[in-house]
Image: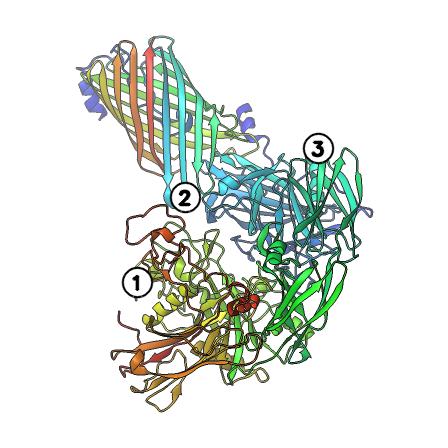
Amino acid sequence: MLLAALFIACKIGCLTGTDDQCVVPSPCEGVAFTCEDGGTVEVYVLQEGDPLPVLGQNVLASPGDIVLRNGHVAAVVDGLDHPHYTAPTGGSLLDLAPVDGTDGLRNIFQATGLLPGDAVNYTEVRILETGENGVGAVQFRGTLDGHPDIPVATRYEIRPCDEGVRIRTEVVNLEPDPYPVFLVDAFYWGGREALPFTPGPGFEHPSFGLTTLADALRDVPWMATGAHGAGAASYGVTSCDHPNLQGFQSREFSAMGAPKRILMPRDYEVFERFVSTDRRSSVAGGADIAQEVRGQSVGSEHVTVSGRLVAEDGRGLGELARASLVIRDEEGDAASQVVPEADGSWHVELPPDHDYTLEILSYGQVVQTSTTKVGGAAVEVGDLTVPAVGELVIDGLVDGATDQLLVFVHPSEQAAEEALSAPLYGNWDSCAPLLGHPFGPSPACNRVLVNGPTTVLVPAGTYDLYAAAGPFTTLGRTDHVTVGPGETVSATVEVQTLPLQPAGTLSADFHVHGRQSFDSAIPDLDRVRAFLAARVEVVASTDHDVVNDYADAVRQLSADDRMRLLVGLETTGHILFPLVETTIYPKVIGHFNFWPLPYDPAGPWRGAPWDEIAEPGELFDRVEDMGLLPSGVKQMNHPWGGIQFGRDYAWPQAIGLDATLDLPTEYDGTGQGLFLRTPPGARHSNADFDTEEVMNSSSNELFQQYRAIWHYLLNQGIVRAGTANSDSHSLTDNVLGTPRNLVWSDTDVASFDEPVFDTAVRDGRMIGTNGPIIEVSMLGTDGAFHTPSVHPFAPEPNGALTLKVSAAPWVPVDEVRIIVNGALVKTITPTVVPADPFGTEDLVRLDTTLPLTELVSGSGDAWIVVEAGAPLEPNADLDCNGIPDTGDNNRDGTIDWRDVEDLEEDPGDTCFDTVGPFTEPPEPAWNTPAFFFERVTPNGHPNAFTNPLVLDRDGDGGYAGVAR
Amino acid sequence: MIPLTLAAAAHAAPACSRDGALPTGPVQAWLWDGMLGLAQPICPATTVGIGPRALLLADTPAFYGRIVASGTIEARLALSERTAVGLTMEPAHYESTISALSSSWFGYGATTLTATQRVDEGGPIGLAMVGRLVLPTSIGLYGHAWPFSADVGMAMQAEHGPWSAHGQVGLAATAGVGAGPTALATGLPITLGGVWRPSGGFSTVIDLQSSLGYTASLDHLALAPALRFGTGRFGMEVGGSIPLAGENRTLTVVRVGAGARL
């Protein structure tokens, strides 16, 4: 009996792993917050028609999700059947903000490791306390996704005065073997919003790969976010039951939890923590609360340090870039970060008994430091001065009238550009100058959206202002604008529309992100202003995994008559799964765009389907079931390169496509065989997309790889329209509309007919460009002149290719390339070179005809694509898969193993396992034509391509590919 | 097999009649921590011994591996010609689980108590009741769980010239004490094996180790070979266990034991 009692007694919570009625104990019992009114708390399931409990554009709450709120904060945990991002089921913290604040959270989900099977699969939810007893709590139970014998239970709790959410998670190992457990909260930042901060390294964390992640683990007392460019709430986390958190940080993910260890059979792990939120966007917002929690739970001490920043010119305090403080201890370790309020006041909580250095940063540079000794009592530092800056009032005129314009602010001299160049707290690319969070609203990095005189604070200096309203206007420049400290200077940039856009075309960007995407922080209003500034007439809103409609912002800007929105979606695989039978590594299927889709402003994923763990064919079915019309478009995005946390961006790369081999028409168990396969039970094959990207991003650095895939598919008889899209996520990463598509269709903005337009897109009646405009046609045997499209025609055997290339004077066109069946058959150097890149002359660079017999030999079917722009850097295919991968990086005239970054010696094989990188064209010299192009197309080089002219030369009425 | 053995026994020496330090009985290479379920030698003897053990598990499709390396010190005390008790300590136990994020631990391992009581009449076939208790002394490896394990069984051994046979069938159980799951597991370990001893200083052993029902219908069916050497009072065994079937994912266990008969 005693023996039995020993085994049965002391069972608490859900730690047995087998009790269906178990209740996870309340977390952080030693932590108590007080508030003046005593506070109330409620927990409920969000119903149709309920107001959203949390505000902000990151909010994704929908009916069926669970709300926990008190008078200070509101939180939403997603319902079991509403999983988001990497979580296989609901049960993640989805939205969290102070009641008077803005949500800045993507999601926080539980996991015990890095593999897909280490994520938690919740199967049961129960509201434990609705708030009537002064506690609100909801409990989720389930198992690890890949380990059904490892039960997990999590309790989310809120109390009346809490400034965050208490969480307790219990994991039990009922497997026969030991399990390597790393029980964490995984914070999904997305990559372009908030930055994680930990005491010590601050914002700068060791880089790591999936195989070196263990080296990046650190023990820290708390973690908090800061530097949110869109003014959203900050967050902090600290443990209530462990002296420290263990985890890693990156701009995309942070994982914070109990120290990793071996979980033996029958053993359990418990992790209690407090996730705080504060309306301040500073680290100090979330961190101060975390330190209060630590003080109550582990007895650590903290004191309040406060002060006031005073701007010499009285300008701009309260803005992230204008002035912020990073506080370091005597070892140089970062202790906190804070952005002052508009009146300059600031306060942080710091560990006592240190000598702290207060670094004042302004526009990314440390402009002043001050030291202060902090003992055991609160310290008032007093006033610290922030140097004066200049004020630029920028106006933009398009054809003489005020209009939306994106102005690039560049230092006039190269030395000044280097001196001003600074990244935001050491993260992301440097900006010169750093006028604002690089991915937030305007001003962002060195870019300013103007519509009428727009005031922006800048470091004192001399600047050139550049602007172009898309590729069909002049390049406006107002140079050597000097602004001193405390001064206000006005400058106007003027651009003029050029007669470049061919009649009957609409300018379109089919890959655009806004703040609803997990990796974007640009508000909707600035996003739409960017559409207008770029003179893009048709935009597909393609946010990651959610449908978003910018209609409200379009209306607010009275832009209804200037542009048309295609409401769409980009599906983004997060959950790895066994995709390719011939490899043990799980995969995702890459990214696809879809439009148009119905927008459900309150529904799960706002009308998108759950897009995980599916081959493309199955995904196409799901999107159709959510309302994609038959006339709609399915687009394969960026078809090569790019992998993040083991997740491929590109479908062909995920399956290991070999462009030297034919595509199997029957599935043979290989990755190659997946390309044309129709998954069991699906209505669509994996190849049923309509378009594929050939140009993506303003830098267009992977163009040669994307076109190699496209050309390969064309030769295989898989004819899909090629598109060119910006994939813009902000004002900075990619310029919206650069590149873009020019679509020949029988509709216009005023009387826009979406099915007609989309049909033209699917037909490939378009070119892709970031500047040059290519117009081609060829006479058919039917007597008609045919322009590019996916539909074959029989060419007049003695006919010719009519070719005209135009461009704005600031867009260099150094060569025109004729591609036949994937091979370069002719290169033409245009002889027209504009004398003045800021002028209006010399638009037509080439106007010629080329006999068909000079271009295409033999008698079989063929296709022709024309490209124009800058010469392409030579790149070779060293791994023999038909896709170029390595450039002449050592500039010795030969591409070989010496150009491969990760090779120390000749591998001795003809085909290498390790390859890359590509060679980028060198940075243009200052004040050359290419330099001026780059001023408004960062890291970009002129490039354009036509869709194919598909030639049915064998007269069988169709096109089935090109024989090898 | 038993009738044949009985018939042969009519011409066999009494069980446990051989002198010398050459180890006897089943292969001492175990799959479960604390030697749970391992068949015991039935011949009481007073010995001391040490030995390293290594276990390797690799489940590549699951991205999982496990490595155990440990050193044991053991002592057996013959209380009489028919009774013996034993103590095995594991002062060095290294455990590593290998996955996308690996973890490892080093410290003191399990402590095992054994008892053997012969119940035969002293003829050529020896029979003994055996028992084992495994105590959760891996403090630090187990964070919150205290698993107690035990096994009991009936062991036999028969000798005929250079050949001998042995076997054991029993019941093994483990249960956890504490706030976590009790998770009582019970199983039926069965071992059968034979020894060829061409000389007093060398023998070779082959066992078939199995268990039913402890974590699965068939926990494991393993081949356990060993080579044994002895001179004077000192003996040594180099053995292993290689699961051939069952749910146990272990690839192999290798164990070297060296001892002295006092």
Quadrant that contains the C terminus of chain A: bottom left
**Nearest to N terminus: mark 3 or mark 1:** 3
Question: Where does label 1 land, which residue?
Answer: A660
Judging depth in this view, the residue of B133 and A520 nearest the camera is A520
Judging depth in this view, the residue of B19 and A568 nearest the camera is A568
Separation of residues labelled 3 and 2 (CA atoms): 40 Å
Compared with A778, A526 (above or below) is above
Query: Which residue lies at the image location 36% right of the left edge and 51% below the top edge?
Result: A898
Q: Are marks 1 and 2 on the same chain?
A: no
Residue B248 visible in the shown view: no
x, y percent for residue A256: 58, 43
Question: Where does label 2 land, which residue?
Answer: B63
Residue A369 visible in the shown view: yes
Quadrant that contains the N terminus of chain A: top right
Chain of the residue where label 1 is placed in the rendered structure: A
x, y percent for residue A388: 75, 55
